[in-house]
Image: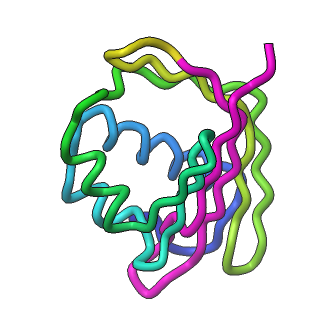
Amino acid sequence: MADGPVNEKTLLDLEHMRCNALLAKDGEALDAIYTDDFVYVHSSGRVEGRGDYLATLAKGENPFLAFRHSGLTAAPFTDAGLLTGTVEIDRKNGQVVFLFVEVWVRTPDGWQLKFQQNTKKAI
């Protein structure tokens, strides 16, 4: 997990690491990425905490095949960072395009993802 001060490059590297862990179905890496109180707001409005989200990923029912980001904006703060942008995700059951926001925070274990929300992009 990345440590030290956060900057735009760090936030982009963290997102890249998260997506690679999702593609590899790397449970150990994913376990380290999310804070204990992580909250994920799905584009459907469903809300999952860390345990439920990791369990959903472990089931692998609709695996991730590719991530393509665009329009990324990284806003670093002292002990947190905000990452926003658009992501196209290829999954087994088709492609989706989301606008997203992520909040990364400094923890004793390094930088971890505390909050994520996706919104389906208007066509």
Viewer-nearest residue: 38 or 113: 38
Magenta segment includes 35: no
Residue 69 spot, x, y in % from top left: 62, 27
Please identify the quadrant where the N terminus is shown: bottom left
Residue drawn at (25%, 56%) of the image: 55
Q: Report the magenta stretch's main SS.
A: strand
Side of 24 relative to 51 (left or right): left
Residue drawn at (63%, 73%) of the image: 5
Please identify the quadrant where the C terminus is shown: top right
Side of 58 relative to 110 (left or right): left
Viewer-nearest residue: 24 or 7: 24
Figure colour scheme: rainbow
Residue 62 spot, x, y in % from top left: 30, 27
Residue drawn at (74%, 79%) of the image: 78
Image position of 25 with respect to 48: above or below? above
Residue drawn at (32%, 67%) of the image: 51
Viewer-nearest residue: 43 or 7: 43
Q: Quadrant of residue 110?
A: bottom left
- The residue positioned farthest toward the bottom in the image shown: 108
Residue 42 spot, x, y in % from top left: 57, 46
Image position of 36 with respect to 112: above or below? below
Number of dots carrying numbers: 0
Residue 58 spot, x, y in % from top left: 20, 47
Q: The magenta stretch spans which residues? A: 96-123
Side of 43 relative to 67 (left or right): right
Magenta segment includes 109: yes
Image position of 93 with respect to 14: above or below? above
Image position of 95 with respect to 28: above or below? above
